[in-house]
Amino acid sequence: MTDWMKAAEAQKENYLNDLVSLMKIPSVRDDSAATDEYPLGPRPAQALKAFLEMAEQDGFKVKNIDNLVGYAEWGEGDETLAILAHLDVMPAGKGWDTDPFDPVIKDGNLYGRGASDDKGPGMAAYYALKYLKDQGVKFNKKVRFIVGTDEESNWTGMHRYFEVEPAPTLGFSPDAEFPVINGEKGQVSLLLDVPAGNGDASTQLVSFESGLRFNMVPREAVALIRTDSPQEVTNDFGHFIEENPVDGNIESTDKGLKITVIGKAAHGMEPEKGINAGTYLAKFLNRYDFAGGAKSFIEFLADYLHLDTRMDGFNGAFADPVMGELTMNAGILNFDADKGGHIDMNFRFPKGMTPDKLEKTVKAIADKFQITVTQGPSQEPHYVDPDDPIVKTLMQAYINQTGDTNAKPEVVGGGTYGRLMKRGVAFGALMPHTPNTMHQANEYQPVNDLITSMAIYMEAINNLVTD
């Protein structure tokens, strides 16, 4: 019997070298730099090219599809097993102790953007596949290791793959947590537009900016206000910072008072684990007499979005016994006195809930503030039966390599490429004992966890292609 852990340990040095080289590429989608050649900007395409060049050198058949998505292929058979990973990363944001794109290992942990989401896990799965190929394992299925370049936004690349290539039979995405994610909640964003203007109020909101992405709890919020009582506001803010779990500062500028609040970023699927700087800033500002669109914007954030990740204030809380609770992340919160405001409410919803129901629920409140609601693209809840052979095979590999005999398949609010296949699941690589730092400053993954995950992937892929 193969000692998969020993095999994975033997790959450690080469694995880390290749992983670090990929992590140094700041592969954040950048629409402002998009061209016909690079539809998502040059950096995601650079990461894709680097990966495919590496895979081709390793002996895989490779293909680049429009600088959006690509794959490395090995094996033959009537069925296709897909391993779906992504090379794009979230914006770094602020608050890092190290350079997010110059990975370092400290105290056994690999720090850098992509260490956990998803370059570290993706490369662990790739190295597992490469090991099996190099050992001469006879595959009874074709395996495609498919890498997208905008998983953190709207999946343009992976959707393109499924348009032009045959659909896989089954597969998994190493882009979540262990043991196995066999269910993923549905997703939708409701896009709210707030009227411009401040009316004739003595306190005026010039601008308000918070949030980098819809699926990320905002760590920072900055507002610029004009007031006849700057010292009073400054004193109030000092007390507010003392009484709440945020940091911040206030400074006088030639345009008014600039107020900054610092919270804690977190993945939008678990917004309660973050501290939303935007809603805290709105909570502070809501004590003052604003008017017009500014008043609507601040009151809506403070009275309805602040600390309400379950929609209780909207009378919209909902839960399914299998898939769990509905969650909401207020990810983008912006206002301009001349242009108006924009709010992105991102929902993760279980079966039994629909985007239309959510829109109706939010609209009932938004109408009171003259805020319009538009429904964005959505994904339906996804679920694979725990008795499906792919779930059982992956679970057994995890149990064998970790000894965690109490492990059970799980349902999460995150969305992975696994949901693109009827028999698709998410599989690692975050261990149950490891903090989730995805989408946060100082993102990291323990090196030992990554090597263990490689061993798990080795056994799992081997069993799937030799059954």
Image: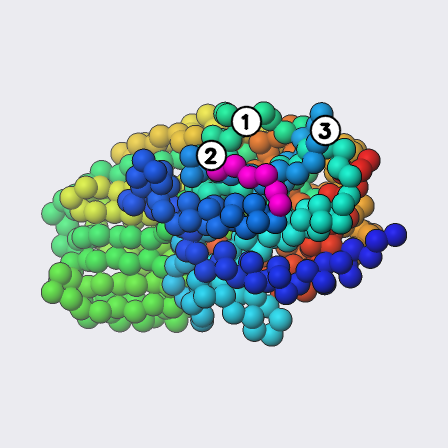
Vertical arrangement, residue 375 with respect to residue 220, above or below: above
How far across and down, in percent of the image, does residue 208 sit?
A: 26, 52
Residue that mark 3 sits on: 77
Q: Which residue is at 46% across, 46% downward?
A: 49
Residue 429 shows in the view: no
Residue 390 shows in the view: yes
Q: Which residue is at 55% across, 39% downward?
A: 62
How far across and down, in percent of the image, does residue 220 sit?
A: 36, 59
SS at mark 1 in the image: loop
The residue furthest bottom is: 107
Would residue 440 appear left or right of 174 to someone viewing this image? left
How far across and down, in percent of the image, does residue 225 sit?
A: 19, 58
| Marks 1 & 2, CB-CB < 8 Å contact | yes
User: Mark 2 or mark 3, which has the lower sequence index?
Assistant: 2
Residue that mark 1 sits on: 165
The dot on residue 65 is 2
Vertical arrangement, residue 169 with respect to residue 5, above or below: above
74 or 403: which is nearer to us? 74
Would residue 348 appear left or right of 403 to someone viewing this image? left
User: Mark 1 or mark 3, which has the lower sequence index?
Assistant: 3
First to last magenta residue range: 59-64
Measured Cα–Cα span from mark 1 to mark 2? 10 Å
Measured Cα–Cα span from mark 2 to mark 3? 23 Å
Disc 1 marks which amino acid?
Glu
242 or 51: which is nearer to us? 51
